[in-house]
Image (spheres, rainbow, N blue to C red):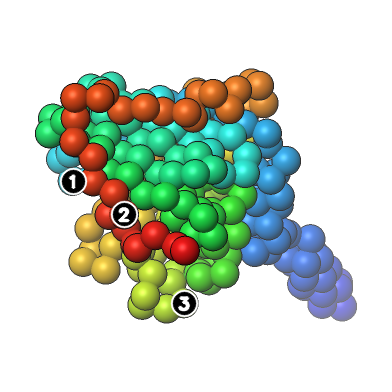
Amino acid sequence: MNRLLAALFLLLAGIFSVSAQETAEKYFDRISNYYGSIRDYEGDLVITRGDVEQVARISYKNPNMMRLDFSDPAGQVLNVNNESLELYLPEYRVSFVQPLKSHSQSTLAGMANSQGLELMKKNYSIGYVSGPQAVPLEEGSEEMVIKLKLNWRSTSEGFRELHIAVGQDNLIRRIEGVTTTLDRITFDFTNLETNKGIPDARFDYKSPPEGNSIENFLFEPEN
């Protein structure tokens, strides 16, 4: 009888433990809501694809302004504001400019914001990699994160899988995307500072006048 009671106790303890754990979708919603409450942030970003690494300073202002000032490749800039998305490539002295209207939310290059997270929830199924407990960012790392894995609901998405690591400060530390061709692109966010009071003027980027400009490189302008 004592063994049965002990077994029943362990079973009930397991049930209550599971029910008390936050599901991956609810956790994702909580992180998304937190990003929605952030007025702005800035920090360092490293983008890695294979052997190619790009380093930038990221500035973001809610709801839809973002700027990446690259130190590698030096002088490259990606800027998104309420009117346009512009990518300046100093190597070719060319700017790619796309006017934004109703497309603005869906064409933001950044995923680490509330709008990007809402799009992820809509287009991907969400689960934990190894449960709701914090684990090392990578093997041998002392940095602890909660890891999520997102799988596409439709093959029309650019990434078939997304792996998201969230730090104990509720900020996204890493996003790794797996493309349809199984290439991996990693976005590492470090030294993030929130609610800095970033002025709108930071996103009024003007590329060097001696360069060429190519407009509407993503889609045709709206009437």
Which residue shows up at 65% across the image and 64% down it?
A: 25
Which residue shows up at 58% across the image and 65% down it?
A: 121
What is the distance, in whole Å, between disc 3 and disc 1 at their CAs?
Answer: 26 Å
What is the distance, in whole Å, between disc 2 and disc 3 at their CAs?
Answer: 29 Å
Q: Amino acid at mark 3?
A: Arg
Circles 3 and 1, Cβ within 8 Å, touching? The answer is no
- In the picture, which quadrant includes the N terminus? bottom right
Front residue of 105/95: it is: 95
Q: Amino acid at mark 1?
A: Gly
In the rendered image, which quarter is residue 174 located in? top left
Disc number lying in front (2 or 1)? 2
Which residue is labeled 3 in the image?
153
Which residue is labeled 2 in the image?
216
Q: Amino acid at mark 2?
A: Asn
Which residue shows up at 37% across the image and 75% down it?
A: 156
What is the distance, in whole Å, between disc 2 and disc 1 at their CAs?
Answer: 29 Å
* Position of 2 relative to 53 (above/below): below
Q: Is residue 119 visible in this depiction of the protein?
A: yes
* Position of 45 relative to 156 (above/below): above
Q: Indicate the position of residue 28 as horizontal and vertical percent values.
A: 63, 56
Which residue is labeled 1 in the image?
50
Front residue of 58/132: it is: 58
Dot placed on the residue nearer the N-terminal end, 3 or 1: 1
Dot placed on the residue nearer the N-terminal end, 2 or 3: 3
Secondary structure of the residue carrying numbered label 1: loop
Q: Indicate the position of residue 82 as horizontal and vertical percent values.
A: 54, 43
* Position of 90 relative to 147 (above/below): above
Circles 2 and 1, Cβ within 8 Å, touching? The answer is no
Query: How many residues crowd around disc 1 within 10 Å: few (fewer than 14), some, or many (20 or more)?
Result: few
Q: Is residue 56 visible in this depiction of the protein?
A: no
